[in-house]
Amino acid sequence: MSEWLLIALTMIVQSSVGLVLMSGLYIYWLKHESNTWQHPVTIFVQEVLLRTLLVSSTLAGVGLTASLNILGHPFNVYHALQNIVQGWVNIETLFAAIYFGGLLLYTLFFMITKHAHVYIMLVIGVIGLIDLYYMAIIYVNSAMITWANINTYFLFYSAVFTLGPALALSFIAYPLGKCLQGKLPVKLVMAALLIVFISITMRLIEQPAYMEWLSEVTIVNANVIFPPQAEFNIKSAFGLRMLSWCLYIIAMAIWSYSLWKGRNNSLINKNYSIKNHAILIGAALVFIAEVINQYTFFIM
């Protein structure tokens, strides 16, 4: 079950960072939408944004706590993390603390002032990306040979731009759909769809190179670790990867359907409830697909 702890740790941090970055983009558009800042819509928008910031902060806090307990005191995940350089762990923990502290302070600031600042959120998001970079370095430099590849960086960062849009649609676009007018709701869904599409496409382009590299890894010594039943895991992971790709495609198709139905209007029309549920269903499928994708990474 130890691999599930690593999956939970990475996905929690990736979700928080992705949600912060997407929230910054959404806030930028919301601030330039005149209909958004009219009472009582303004109050509802502020409540939604505050709720989103609280979710991001909670995820960041859980990620920092898990990082201190897991990476700070390496446990036996195939014994892979026993030989990592402590300096990388310290740097990762430092940036995780800075990210969580900055996000928490900004959440408190927003709670008091009710003013959203896009650039502050983007800076906090960049700090989160740096934290993920050092987290990825820990895995790349571990004894697990199947992690010692650029594929690890692709996995970590592509997850940010799949989980982030899915969460932003769920926590921002979905609740605000009933009060937003014009083309803004369609724009929110379109942005999430485009970002997820680019993220998945980049991962698909990189995947064949990783599989080719994996097939050529044949040298095993005392400092190199393969997961138990490595050959079986690599073969069985193919089916799981195909399942995850199919779920990604279905999710994007559902979002595209939502856009097609609202091509002439906003999400507010007689079919609104159908498209609203479609947004949530697509987000749920993206999350499930990401869990499967990360599971295949950690078992290999």
Image: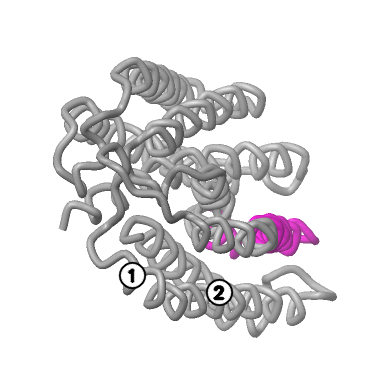
On residue 233, the disc is 1
- Which SS class for mark 2? helix
Q: What residue type is labelled 1?
A: Asn
The foreground one among 300 and 145 is 145
Region rendered in magenta: 172-199
Q: Is residue 278 above or below residue 177?
A: below
**Which badge, 2 or 1, is on the more N-terminal residue?**
1
Residue 72 percent location from the top left of the image? 22, 25
Q: In which quarter of the image is residue 3?
A: bottom left
What residue sits 38% from the left and 32% below the top?
138
Quadrant the C terminus occupies: bottom left
What residue sits 44% from the left and 80% below the top?
239
On residue 245, the disc is 2
Q: Coloured how?
A: one colour
Q: Is residue 180 at least partly visible in the picture?
A: no
Q: Is residue 219 at least partly visible in the picture?
A: yes
Q: What residue type is labelled 2?
A: Trp
Quadrant the N terminus occupies: bottom left
